[in-house]
Image: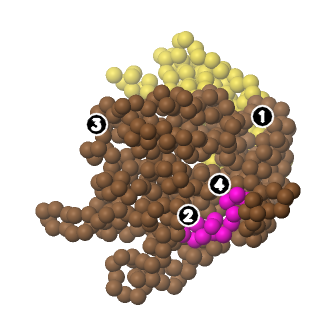
Chain colours: A brown, B yellow
Amino acid sequence: MTSMIEPEHRPAGHNQPPTLDVDRIRADFPILERQVYGRPLVYLDNAASAQKPRQVIQAMTDVMEGCYSNVHRGVHKLSQESTDLYEGARGRIAQFINAASSDEIVFTRGATEAINLVANGLGQGMLQPGDEVVISWLEHHSNIVPWQLLRDRLGIELKVVPIDDQGNFLYEEYLALLGPKTKLVAVSHISNALGTITPIADIIDAAHQKDVPVLVDGCQAVPHMKVDVQALGADFYAFSGHKLYGPTGIGVLYGRKDLLNRLPPYQGGGEMISSVTFERSTFKAAPHRFEAGTPAIIEAIGLGAAVDYMNALDFQAIAAHEQDLLDYAQTRLSEIDGLSILGQSDDKAAIVSFTMDGAHPHDIGTIVDRAGVAIRAGHHCAQPIMDRYGVAATVRASFGLYNTREEVDKLTDALHQVKELFG
Amino acid sequence: MLDELRDLYQEVILDHGKNPRNFRHPDDANRTAHGFNPMCGDTLFIYLKVDDEGVIQDCAFMGKGCAISTASASLMTEILKGKKEDEARVLFERFHLLCTEDPSADESEDSDQDDMERLEVLSGVREFPVRVKCATLAWHTMSAALDGQQEVTTE
């Protein structure tokens, strides 16, 4: 267990951040025991999707073996138990990001659906042609394309906040883009392609001064740092379960209650309905009005378990561990001639995107894979950033709870083999 | 580890990957197509000059790609020069088989034996299924270029 002592209560001279017991954490992740091509797996593709601890796997197995049923429907015991687990997970996720109420947590299939839900709702009579939505160059495709679809349908305009060569969000340029027609700001908390941490609290403050709501794409942030949606003032906050050591097929849209209840339903049918006649239907309040059909019950319970898992750790320790891995990786990788790291922002999460002279990211990916090292090679669903740097693709190593300095060394060794082949 | 990878990244591939042949845009190309691999963002243009007899007089390419896709495109441009359209199509089929299945599955008569031997260097992708697309991108694009022209000539 990590230290529970707050820094101010520590004796003088011991003002170190709490440390993470990585060996104990690694023992929680069964997949880390496997070998790839006869070598121990080194999993450095966490920004795409993270591995699952036994606690999450067990929670999902337990519900399927013990009390699985549909939720909110049955009068029988199993339905009650499943409903309690499902709604209990919602409550714990609300606490996890410090939402004011569990009614502000909508379960979606993932962050992409969460963003589409908001775009779709705003598109139903709440935005007019000529209205503007502000995004940034750092966005994942899932926070670009829904707004483009809305632009093409409604005639709204997209304004894009630029970044500098280091990958920093250009705050002054952002302020200049906020205007009388701005109706929404939708930006990432952390860039999945570069690791840039945006000044999200300032971004939200500036928008609120103009009464503009802000949607935050928090996919990369929730696994890496303590997120407090109320302290940030976020109006909407979207994230996916599978990047938070939880299952796929589940994600969260946090929305301020008043805003959520102003959005029209996203899909129709099932639990979202209060009453239906053939003349008209009335809809429940959020979150249920957005959860049409049978939801991802097992996955929601699994995500609840993932949140419990994270809560048992110390977020300061997680951040310190991942920051150490980032610094170490950037130092080791910089030793390699011809390797260039894209995105060196002042405030950065544990994501390293790079290219190597003379070797294409795909070739690098294949070679390091044979060393058992899983990384991502491609455009990371963030093609505008690739265009910004004039590359088609990069190699991306992204770190999580269970990664170690030894694994960074294995990546570095494998990259030396790339040099040997392509040098 | 390097030994395993040498099967994929043979010297010929590394050479063609670094120094691609026919990497240019000929002014007199009369059939072109653009190939794109959305997975990695690789992009490739194939330029063919096909004469009235259906013989490929010139074959060139440009674009951005990995060592496998660049080497494959480079070798293809060398091999296709002087071939007839239908010969190019047969070679594409045989090359695809080489990249995906056991070569003994190929029962074609071996008039193309020399060409197939040259292409054999790319057969390493069989052990790397995700890389088959890289190896065949240029060929798919070439085939599209030929098809495009066919539509034009039938008008």
Label 4 environment density (alpha carbons within 10 Å; few <14, some 14–19, many ≥20): many
Task: Say what amino acid the circle numbered 3 marks.
Answer: Gln
- Residue at x 49% of width, y 17% of height: B30
Q: CA distance from mark 1 to mark 4?
A: 26 Å
- Residue at x 48% of width, y 38% of height: A206
- Find the magenta span and give its range: A303-318
Q: Position of residue A402 (x, y in %)?
A: 73, 61
Task: Say what amino acid the circle numbered 2 marks.
Answer: Phe
What residue does disc 3 label?
A128
Label 2 environment density (alpha carbons within 10 Å; few <14, some 14–19, many ≥20): some
Instruction: Judge depth for marks 1 and 3 and give the one in front.
Output: 3
Q: CA distance from mark 1 to mark 2?
A: 38 Å
What residue does disc 1 label?
A339
Do callouts 2 and 4 point to residues on the same chain? yes
What residue does disc 4 label?
A224
Visible in this render: residue A376? yes
What secondary structure is found at the residue carrying circle 4? loop
- Who comes first in sequence, dot 1 or dot 4? 4
Q: Chain of mark 2?
A: A
Q: Position of residue A98 (x, y in %)?
A: 52, 61
Q: CA distance from mark 1 to mark 3?
A: 47 Å
Instruction: Judge depth for marks 1 and 4 and give the one in front.
Output: 4
Do callouts 1 and 2 point to residues on the same chain? yes
